[in-house]
Image: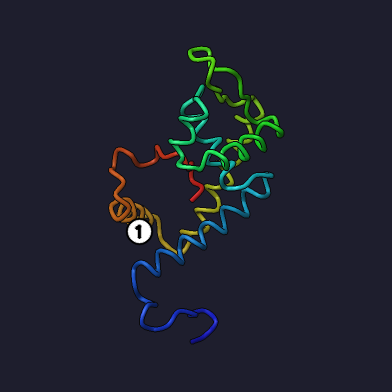
Amino acid sequence: MNAENTAPSAIRDLPSWLLGRAAARGRGLVADALAEQGLKMWHHVVLSAVADLEPVAQADLVRGVRLDPKDMVGVLNDLQAADLVERAPDPTDRRKNAVTLTEEGTRRLRACADAARVANDALLAPLPPAERDLFLDMLRRVSGIAPDDAGTGTEGGSA
């Protein structure tokens, strides 16, 4: 095995292995791009979800992005400390917190979306445009994402 192919030959060509390697490379590229914006992957996921759903109850946000409630509190604390989101009592149910983006949060989300797009372009750079479209279509099918769900996820290009 050389440094480029560290996997044993028995698994090197398995789709699950290759998808995992591609995902790890993509996460690394996106994480680095988001770090330049001062954010982490989960910050971007949560900002994207809030933008799609705001005002959104914190509990609904937890369910929507499938993050542990304790971890969500930490992410929201980070985002609120950076003046990217506001948490306030939900006007329809004062027992709940509603989360909304601030103007700075909207601006930073746009910057992060641009950075994530550039990182994902770098990930797919070895493929010509037609193959990129085909590859993305195949990934959606393998992932069980319906065509009308494509592009509406909460990750906003983070993964």
Q: How is the image coloured?
A: rainbow
Instruction: Give the residue at x 39% y 55%.
Output: 129
Q: Residue at image x 49%, y 15%? A: 93
Q: Is residue 156 left or right of residue 142?
A: right
Residue 96 higher or lower than 128, as above or below = above
- Pointer 1: what residue? 131
Residue 132, x across and y down, in percent: 38, 56
Q: Disc 1 on helix, strand or loop?
A: helix
* Outermost residue toward the bottom in this view: 1
Q: Residue at x 57, y 24 (%)?
A: 100
The image shows residue 102 at horizontal and vertical percentages of 63, 25
**41 to the left or right of 8:** right
Image-based side of 28 in relation to 146, left or right:
right
Query: Compared to 108, does 55 lie above or below?
Result: above
Q: Position of residue 36 (x, y in %)?
A: 68, 49
Q: Nearer the viewer, residue 54 or 149?
A: 54
Q: Residue at x 36, y 66 (%)?
A: 16
